Amino acid sequence: MESQSETTQIVSALKLPILKTGDYDLWSMRMEQYLTHTDYALWEVIVNGDAPTVASASFEGLIPPKTAEQKLARKNELKAKSTLLLAIPDEHLLKFHGIKDAKTL
């Protein structure tokens, strides 16, 4: 029987599925499987959005998170976006890098 640390090492050693031209449907299913298996909170951010964007009358854009909940939401959003960007081939990365949140990406 494998120990918890051995299982964790095997899971973390998995490579992200890379998006290939014409394979979006298969890639999206694999990414969903990968993210729900490794960190379900990331998948929820991608599906539901979780960006702590707050706009005021004088300023539009990101306001630094102040509460622990806002900090966690920001961390999950950045982690989800980074994970998705890692699975995009270099030749297409510039097209997607400017997208602001994981749900849109």
Image (spheres, helix red, strand yellow):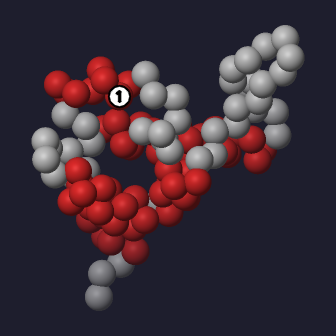
Residue 75 % position (x, y): 60, 40
In the image, 96: left or right of 49? left
Query: Label 1 sits on what residue type?
Result: Phe
Residue 70 % position (x, y): 74, 41
Q: Residue at x 42, y 39 (%)?
A: 105
- Relative to 54, residue 47 above or below: below
75 vs 51, nearest the viewer? 51
- Relative to 1, residue 36 above or below: above
Residue 46 visible? The answer is yes
Q: Residue at x 48, y 39 (%)?
A: 104
Residue 40 % position (x, y): 50, 63
The residue positioned farthest toward the bottom in the image shown: 1
- Relative to 1, residue 62 above or below: above
Residue 8 visible? The answer is no
- Relative to 65, residue 40 above or below: below
In the image, 76: left or right of 102? right
13 vs 52, nearest the viewer? 52
